[in-house]
Amino acid sequence: MKQLNNLKELISMGKYRLGDEKACQEDIEAFLVKNNVKYEKEFKLDFGIVDFFFPNSGLALEVKVSKSWNKLTVYRQCERYCKDSRVKGILLATGSAQKLPAEINGKPSLVYLLSESAL
């Protein structure tokens, strides 16, 4: 869980555009590159493709900016990702308030509200 909190803290230090999900992902990627963080973008898991995967820690980062998504659908997406044995925890970075349980499939999960880091 400490690594997941560290990832959340790291992501909170960046500034991101929230008008478009792709633009937000570009901003996150630029921030990760600037900070020399090893990651894989659009990483193929057993049950889908997560936006960012951090191979050193096994953490996944899913980005949701649009405010019109179904919260249950987002939860189920995170749940699928947590079925993969390589995923050790998941951080949902979201443009709209959403909660996740403390664990999904036995793996820690956190939510980061991107508006705290908006440009």
Image: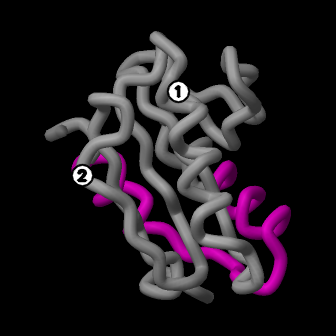
- Direction from residue 65 to residue 102 in the image, left or right: left
> Disc 2 on helix, strand or loop?
loop
Q: Which residue is mark 2?
A: 102
Q: Quadrant of the C terminus?
A: bottom right
Q: Position of residue 22 (x, y in %)?
A: 84, 62
Disc 1 crowd rating (10 Å Cα; few below 14, some 14-19, many 20+) is: few
Q: Amino acid at mark 1?
A: Lys
Q: Which residues are magenta?
A: 5-30
Read off the residue under disc 1: 38
Image point (43%, 31%), residue name: 59
* 117 to 57, vertically: above or below: below
- How far apart are labels 1 and 2 at the CA level? 25 Å
Residue 6 magenta-drawn?
yes
Mark 2: few/some/many CA within 10 Å (<14, 14-19, 20+): few
Residue at (27% x, 40% y) in the render: 108
35 to 15, vertically: above or below: above
Residue at the (70%, 85%) spot, across then down: 67
